[in-house]
């Protein structure tokens, strides 16, 4: 399983962008998503952008990653990290709803 890390573009060119991430500033490969403007949010894996995302989604992913780090540090209540899932049944993404039984 891979975990995507949100990254916000600081500057870039056609192939790479300097991005701010939860682990500091990183150079991110843009070959899968194309050139992106400063301020754009990307979901990255192994320093390569896999998807362009919005700020709200970036915040939710970062909150979930904070939750995973809390669990690894021994926390037992991580509900504050998954506020978007509290009191609702998670939904399948649209592309999976079409094939789900």
Image (cartoon, rainbow, N blue to C red):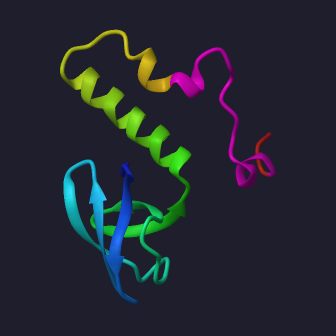
* Whether residue 3 is situated above or below residue 43 in the rendered picture: above
Q: Is residue 96 left or right of residue 8?
A: right
Tell me what residue is drawn at x 49 percent, y 77 percent: 33
Residue 92 is situated, as x and y percent measured from the top left of the image, at 69, 40
- Most foreground residue, 95 or 83: 83
Residue 50 is situated, as x and y percent measured from the top left of the image, at 45, 67
Q: Is residue 70 part of the magenta span, yes or no?
A: no
Residue 19: image quadrant is bottom left
Residue 53 is situated, as x and y percent measured from the top left of the image, at 54, 58
Tell me what residue is drawn at x 28 percent, y 67 percent: 47
> Quadrant where the C terminus lies?
top right
Tell me what residue is drawn at x 78 percent, y 51 percent: 99
Q: Is residue 4 left or right of residue 82?
A: left
- Most foreground residue, 20 or 75: 20
Residue 81: image quadrant is top left
Residue placed farthest to the top in the image?
Answer: 76
* Whether residue 70 is situated above or below residue 45 in the rendered picture: above
Number of numbered tags placed on the structure image:
0
Residue 54: image quadrant is bottom right
Q: Is residue 81 left or right of residue 98?
A: left
- Most foreground residue, 1 or 5: 5
Tell me what residue is drawn at x 39 percent, y 40 percent: 62
Task: Report the magenta residues as a range.
Answer: 83-98
């Amino acid at each position: 399983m891979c975990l995507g890390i949100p990254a916000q573009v600081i500057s870039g060119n056609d192939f790479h962008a300097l991005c701010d991430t939860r682990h500091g500033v990183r150079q991110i490969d843009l070959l899968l998503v194309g050139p992106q403007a400063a301020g754009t949010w990307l979901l990255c894996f192994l320093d390569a952008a896999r998807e362009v995302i919005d700020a709200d989604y970036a915040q939710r992913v970062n909150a979930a990653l904070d939750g995973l780090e809390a669990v690894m540090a021994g926390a037992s209540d991580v509900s504050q990290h998954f506020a978007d899932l509290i009191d609702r049944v998670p939904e399948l993404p649209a592309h999976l709803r079409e094939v789900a039984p």
